[in-house]
């Protein structure tokens, strides 16, 4: 009998332990961190919204942008605390492109109190055209006119614009602990980002066609311009380096529209036809049958181009006239015409004449009186120096000055981009880009300045 009671007691104890510890219950996986949820994209980056707002105050007051008092860092900080966002910590953004066209974008912020955030979103929904819906079980808000979506979790908030909200929401909600996407892991671990407020990294297959692995930009600004510290990394050893001591350059003038001054050591490019950049310029040049090989043989690495303003050129034409005997004769006449101003300088070697012969043979360079035309260019003077070639529309030879600065000024869609190459390493190019903000402000904030 004692044995029976002992057996019953053991069974009772085991049953009690089963009820307490429930070994059949699967342990709930720990939730992912905020950084584990960041979706991979072609372009990723981070910004401190408060620091960015503070740095843009000068711009907003300079251009008298409307409602600028609501964009101060103090106002943004107070509103973020009221509605549960922690904007004292960085926000992280992502952008996708397709054939160099913007496809979608989003930004994620850290949430301090999701209950306050919900109240804030409900207020915005009431005062705007946003609607509420459910996507993949997440309560979401969206604006069908702007294709804008907003949703949140316990410690994260997402603002997204694009046509793929389900894909992005799925990546965020199915993330697992300590499985931060590789791009974001490399980005966040890089020490070069520690002291920068707004930075981004571009890394996608289309860049490889240009021999580029990735591009990193770090932004600062003053009242009138944005500045980008730039690092471009090559997929292989860089095809050029900077010449010591620089070379002949054109100076910018009041009428200058575009300007290029580069002084490069291109020996690696000349000797490596498998170089991605070699293949790229061969592909582009092939469209007009440009003699790329002859050009690279003749070019010694210095190029200066200045475009802008106008010059007066003579245009010759034939006119039929009656002579004193009333016979029709053809008379060659000339008249002054305005032509766009161009100046081009190339440092060359003893292959220069071979290159020019190739241009003439292929019909890319043709004679026009005492001048030459390159395809559809205005008539150009062609001058051969001891180790250079110059083409220009002006009557007199444009002056060059020796300079070590490698710079590019380009106007595109009313924007003037000013770039400088500071240095190069084995696989990297480092420089700065300046973008004036006046056209951007006038385009996207048309009420500014009033």
Image (cartoon, rainbow, N blue to C red):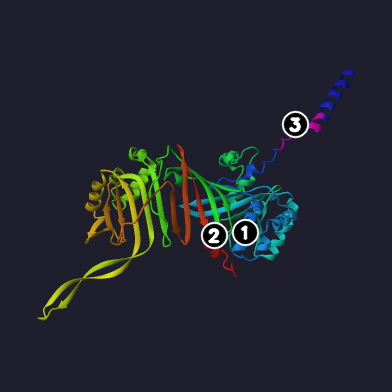
Q: CA distance from mark 1 to mark 2?
A: 12 Å
* Mark in the foreground, 3 or 1: 1
**Label drawn at residue 346:** none
Residue toward you, 427 or 203: 427
Ranked by sequence position, the earlier of labels 3 and 1 is 3
> Mark 1, residues whose alpha carbon is within 10 Å: few (<14), some, or many (≥20)?
some
Rendered residue at 72%/61% (across/down):
123
Q: Which residue is mark 2?
A: 437
Q: Which residue is mark 3?
A: 23
Ranked by sequence position, the earlier of labels 1 and 2 is 1
Measured as percent of width and height from the top left, residue 316 is found at: 23, 68
Q: Quadrant of residue 82?
A: bottom right
Measured as percent of width and height from the top left, residue 15 is found at: 82, 29
Question: In the image, 35: left or right of 357?
Answer: right
Q: Is residue 228 visible?
A: yes
Split into 4 quadrants, where in the image is the C terminus? bottom right
Q: Are marks 3 and 1 in contact (CB under 8 Å)?
A: no
Residue toward you, 348 or 97: 348
> Mark 3, residues whose alpha carbon is within 10 Å: few (<14), some, or many (≥20)?
few
* Mark in the foreground, 2 or 3: 2
Q: Which residue is mark 1?
A: 58
Q: Are marks 1 and 2 in contact (CB under 8 Å)?
A: no
Q: Is residue 1 visible?
A: no
Rendered residue at 68%/56% (across/down):
73
Q: Which residues are magenta?
A: 17-28
Measured as percent of width and height from the top left, residue 1 is found at: 90, 19
Question: In the image, 149: left or right of 115?
Answer: left
Ranked by sequence position, the earlier of labels 2 and 3 is 3
Question: In the image, 21: left or right of 252?
Answer: right
**30 lies above or below 67:** above
Q: CA distance from mark 3 to mark 1?
A: 63 Å
Rendered residue at 17%/72% (across/down):
331
């Amino acid at each position: 009998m004692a044995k029976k009671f002992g057996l019953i007691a053991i069974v009772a104890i085991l049953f009690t332990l089963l009820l307490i510890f429930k070994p059949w219950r699967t342990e709930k996986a720990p939730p992912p961190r905020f950084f584990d949820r960041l979706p991979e994209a072609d372009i990723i980056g981070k910004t401190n919204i408060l620091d960015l707002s503070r740095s843009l105050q000068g711009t907003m007051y300079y251009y008298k942008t409307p409602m600028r008092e609501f964009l101060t860092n103090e106002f943004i900080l107070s509103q973020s605390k009221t509605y549960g966002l922690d904007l004292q910590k960085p926000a992280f953004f992502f952008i996708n492109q397709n054939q160099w066209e913007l496809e979608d974008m989003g930004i994620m912020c850290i949430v301090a109190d999701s209950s306050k955030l919900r109240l804030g979103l409900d207020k915005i929904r009431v005062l705007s055209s946003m609607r509420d819906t459910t996507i993949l079980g997440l309560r979401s808000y969206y604006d069908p006119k702007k294709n804008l979506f907003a949703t949140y979790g316990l410690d994260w908030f997402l603002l997204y614009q694009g046509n793929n909200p389900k894909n992005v929401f799925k990546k965020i909600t199915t993330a697992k602990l300590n499985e931060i996407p590789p791009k974001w892991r490399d980005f966040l671990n890089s020490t070069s980002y520690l002291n920068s407020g707004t930075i981004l990294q571009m890394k996608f297959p289309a860049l490889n066609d240009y021999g580029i692995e990735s591009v990193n930009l770090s932004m600062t600004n003053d009242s009138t311009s944005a500045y980008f510290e730039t690092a471009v990394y090559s997929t292989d050893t860089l095809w050029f380096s900077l010449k010591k001591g620089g070379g002949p350059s054109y100076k910018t003038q009041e009428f200058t529209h575009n300007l290029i001054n580069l002084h490069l050591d291109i020996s690696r490019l000349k000797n490596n036809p498998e170089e991605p950049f070699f293949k790229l310029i061969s592909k582009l040049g092939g469209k007009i049958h440009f003699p790329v090989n002859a050009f690279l043989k003749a070019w010694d690495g210095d190029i200066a181009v200045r475009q802008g303003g106008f010059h007066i050129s003579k245009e010759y034409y034939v006119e039929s006239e009656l002579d004193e005997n009333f016979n029709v004769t053809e008379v060659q006449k000339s008249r002054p015409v305005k032509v766009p101003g161009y100046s081009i300088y190339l440092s060359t070697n003893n292959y220069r004449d071979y290159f020019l012969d190739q241009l003439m043979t292929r019909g890319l360079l043709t004679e026009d009186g005492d001048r030459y035309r390159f395809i559809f260019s205005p008539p150009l003077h062609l001058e051969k120096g001891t180790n250079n070639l110059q083409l220009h529309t002006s009557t007199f030879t444009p002056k060059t000055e020796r300079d070590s600065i490698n710079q590019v000024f380009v106007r595109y869609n009313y924007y003037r981009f000013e770039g400088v190459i500071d240095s190069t390493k084995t696989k990297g190019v480092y420089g700065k880009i300046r973008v004036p903000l006046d056209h951007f402000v006038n385009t996207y904030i048309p009420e500014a300045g009033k």
